[in-house]
Amino acid sequence: MSKGALVGIVVVVVVVIVVLALLFSGAIPGFKLGSSSSSTPSVTSFKTALSTANSTASSRGGSWVAIAAVGVDSVKPLAPPSNIAGLLGLSCPVTNQSSSVPSLPAYSGSYSSGDQTGWIFFLFQSSSSTLLLLLVIGSSTTTLGTIVGASCFSSAFDYFTGASGVIDSPAATSAVASDASSFLSTYSTASSVLFFISGYSITEGTQTFTSAATWTVDYTNCSINATSGTGSEFSATVNGTAGTVTTNGGVRAIACNEFSISPTQQPKSTPLGSALSMGSPTLTTGTSSTNSIGCRTGDYCYDVLVEQASAGLTFSAVGLEVKTTTGVPYTGTVSLAFDSIDTDSAATVPAICAADVCNDGGSTTGWTFGTGYSGSTPITTVMYVVVDMGTSNPVGQGFELVAIGQAAFSGTVAVNLP
């Protein structure tokens, strides 16, 4: 497995999220507010709509994997996209778009139920190298387009695990109900956007790296593609298999034109805790093979997996430090780094700094980037933090790894180092 395949997963996730956002944000010509309708639309859950989408895909033959989806309840109707060619950032054209695409009707019912008026699915078939985009409204399916050709996709598409074992959309909204209670009690009518991103599984030798599917739940009292006005937004992410909240962005005031229905556009002062979560640290010891990639030979090191990261979160937007029990930086720290889940003999890691406090916006050491990486490189769930604690055993000393929000992010995310 090459590093290119792993980077490909990052690119695929980011591209899919961007396109899903564009489909509903008005950035695609023809996809905008439609005319009002007095009829009450039918609504469906993710799994019900996926079953409908899978039936349509199966008629084309072969097996298909749902790598992403977005469901919308909008307080105002949305007209369909008229042109989606080129938006995937691929050289291959989007073909087979239906000549008649229905509008997404307005909905004023329970926007927090998890049942949506419309769903768009990204389905991938590895055997034919085909990406299929389907719009499901009620029990009807419309083809938004297909992209075909092995040269159009990296091998990263083959690692996505689809929707098997994933919780349904009502379970995702139920998981955030407590966190969203203030928003729900304030706004009886609002728009909701639910994102599903598939998990992945990568096997390298005897090791298997996995990442669970993710739900992102967004509520707003703004019109989805409004160009003016102010409003409120609630956003949270949910582990797609465990059904637990991984990040809670809470309720915030927004200018309606900044509501992006996607974590690709982050407003200023976004809490870092709503964009980043880290797993339980694993203690390791550096060997000669890791000496150049963040953990010196003989040193005690912690590996901390990035479990959740919004697509707008980049290296330049995050600083790292190790703190002692008294809350001061631990000067014994040798280095802090971001590495990728990859066993290639890389000469460098994506980002590293030899200091106890890195990229905190002050006078401390900034990141040194590996080949092909920069401050604008997105932090993703195929990455992990490597903390080189030096030669003294850190176990039980009460140390803490702290991520520090920079640029458009504020606040911190902390993980205890056992």
Image (cartoon, grey):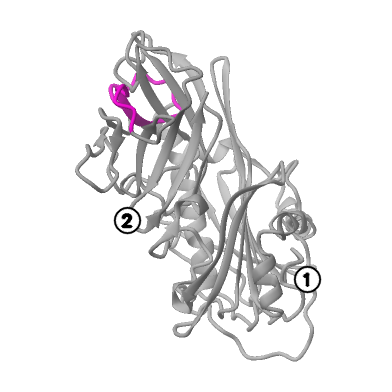
Residue 77 location in percent, x, y?
64, 83
Upstream in the sequence, badge 1 or badge 2? 1
**Residue 228, located in which quarter of the rendered image?**
bottom left
Furthest toward the front, the residue is: 326
| Placement of 185 over or under 334, stated as above or below | below
Residue 342 location in percent, x, y?
44, 25
Where disc 2 sits, the SS reads: loop
Q: Amino acid at mark 2?
A: Ala
- The reply to whether discs 1 and 2 touch (Cβ–Cβ < 8 Å) is no
Between residues 303 and 399, which one lies in front from this camera angle?
399
**Residue 307, located in which quarter of the rendered image?**
top right
Q: Amino acid at mark 1?
A: Val
Question: Where is mark 2, residue-wise?
Answer: 407
Q: Is residue 90 left or right of residue 80?
A: left
Residue 406 location in percent, x, y?
34, 52
Between residues 153 and 324, which one lies in front from this camera angle?
324
Instruction: Specify few, some or many for label 2: CA neighbours under 10 Å numbering under 14, 14-19, or 20 or more.
Output: some
Furthest toward the left, the residue is: 363
Magenta stretch: includes residue 344: yes
| Placement of 214 over or under 287, stated as above or below | below
Residue 255 location in percent, x, y?
45, 77
Residue drawn at point x = 30 percent, y = 47 percent: 316
Magenta stretch: includes residue 347: yes
Q: CA distance from mark 1 to mark 2?
A: 39 Å
Between residues 296 and 119, which one lies in front from this camera angle?
296
Circle 1 or circle 2, nearest the eye: 2
Residue drawn at point x = 44 percent, y = 30 percent: 325
Question: Where is mark 1, residue-wise?
Answer: 43
Q: Please give the range of residues in magenta.
A: 329-348
Q: Magenta part mainly helix, strand or loop?
A: loop
